[in-house]
Amino acid sequence: MTEPTSINTTALTIFIAFFALITVMGFVAARWKRGDLSQLHEWGLGGRQFGTVISWFLVGGDFYTAYTVIAVPALVYSVGAYGFFALPYTIIVYPFVFAVMPKLWEACKRGDHITAADYVQGVFGGKWLPAAIAVTGIVATMPYIALQLVGMQVVIKSLGIGGELPLIIAFVILALYTYASGLRAPAMIAFVKDIMIYIVVIAAVCWIPTKLGGYGALFDTADKYFAAKGGATGILLKPSQFTAYATLALGSALAAFMYPHTMTGVLSSSSAATVKKNAIFLPAYTVLLGLIALLGYMAIAAGVHVKSASDVVPALFLTLFPSWFVGFAAAAIAISALVPAAIMSIGAANLFTRNLYKPLIAPNATPEKEASNAKLVSLVVKFGALLFIVVLPTHYAIDMQLLGGVWILQIFPAVVFSLYTRRLTSSGLFLGWLAGISLGTVLAAEQGLKPVYALHFAGATYPTYIGLIALVVNIVVTVVVSAVTAKSRVGQVDVAVR
């Protein structure tokens, strides 16, 4: 399969029609579930009024992105079974969401907190620990938004249109309706996006195997392909991959709902019970993810050959489906970029406004000023991500996103542990965060920004996710420093009493 050299008119027409539909929906969303959009909790959290169904689509919409649809099959296509680590990671994450996130939602509702950093500030006070959490969230989110652009760029190219202009137009439209409608826009569009993705994937997993001789032939072809390729590839994990696979799954699960976009999706829910119900029903997306991952094996069986693994899914559809379905699938993937990109930019804007701009720059800012500032920041974030893709090679965004996962995991103790204990101090959490960020960055830099580091113990080597290594160090430093500073604080109180 080669890259398209001419415009696929039928596919492009279908693509534009669906893109026009969600653009209209994005602007109409400002009138949906009416609220005062000059208030940050209305613009940035949808007024905390999204029920179970809306939240299910919204959280699924920002968790399963265009890059998921593009990158997971690409990884499976390239390395085989190792690419399925995303599957156990999404299985692990939902019990965590069920146990922890309702408690966080209740704490944020009581304190009128809009971000995770707001919550930490409410518990510990001060400016610098919340600011550190806010900066971590914003920096980790930027390349994530950029990767949504990568996903959109890939599908637009598959329609025969090159260059950056279509991408720029798409994100100008996204920026405008996000500015106007806030979180209501991606919440409304998520309905269309998720239904379209389900249709595309179900059609693919039912139709493609019939063209390739069934699933047995498909797996047999993939097995022979990886056997010929050699190395650490195959449809079964190699023993040397076990610890890397397991720690990537666990670390990614712990990090997933620390990101500003997933946190925003949770905090926009109408109640803690809504969060619990979603944790019960969201595993339906895990089934979808498993089916999406199989597209990598299907591409191998279909004889798809591409210069970049990211082109695998569009190339597979171009090979086996009629033009009208190619356009529909391209629209589904492109919309899967717009929904999370909107939520990510809103989450980052909320963090900047509440935890950097207001406490450090404009402490007397009114609620209206907060909201207007967040709207402007959401524009800056989107176009910063767009500049990231236009100016820098794509692989930098991918590498930075891996590093972003290492970083965002380091806010876990401050956000989660503080829900269950008050023995930790802000000094301990800040120094733990600093130690985790520093170690994670250094280890990742040593590995060329790859997410796994080889630990040597008792004569054996255990490849381990760097984010998890850094988190363990973070926790140790946090506990030790908290114990020391807590004793110091008690001693000062005793002296004062005397």
Image: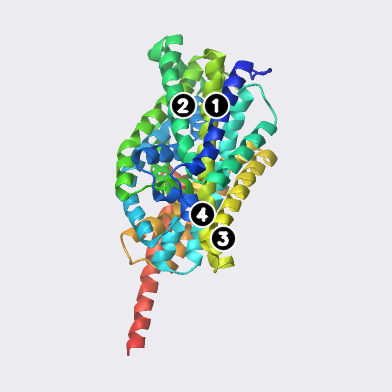
Quick one: which residue is furthest to the bottom in this view?
498
Q: Secondary structure at mark 4?
A: helix
Sequence-first disc among 4 and 1: 1
Which circle marks residue 429 in the picture?
none
Q: What residue is rendered at 36% in x and 87% in y?
A: 496
Looking at the rendered image, the disc whose residue lies closer to the viewer, 4 or 3, is: 3
Q: Which residue is mark 4?
A: 350
Q: What residue is rendered at 51% in x and 57% in y?
A: 134
The CA span between labels 1 and 3 is 35 Å
| Badge 4: residue crowd in 10 Å (few <14, some 14–19, many ≥20) | many
Position of 420 with respect to 263 (left or right) is: left
The CA span between labels 4 and 1 is 29 Å
Image coordinates for residue 145, horizontal then vertical, percent = 56, 42
Looking at the rendered image, the disc whose residue lies closer to the viewer, 4 or 1, is: 1
Amino acid marked by disc 3: Lys
Sequence-first disc among 1 and 2: 1
Amino acid marked by disc 2: Met
The CA span between labels 3 and 2 is 38 Å
Q: Which residue is mark 2?
A: 196
Sequence-first disc among 2 and 4: 2
Looking at the picture, does residue 291 appear above or below residue 164? above
Q: Which residue is mark 1?
A: 18
Amino acid marked by disc 4: Asn
Q: What residue is rendered at 41% in x and 65% in y?
A: 122
The CA span between labels 2 and 4 is 29 Å
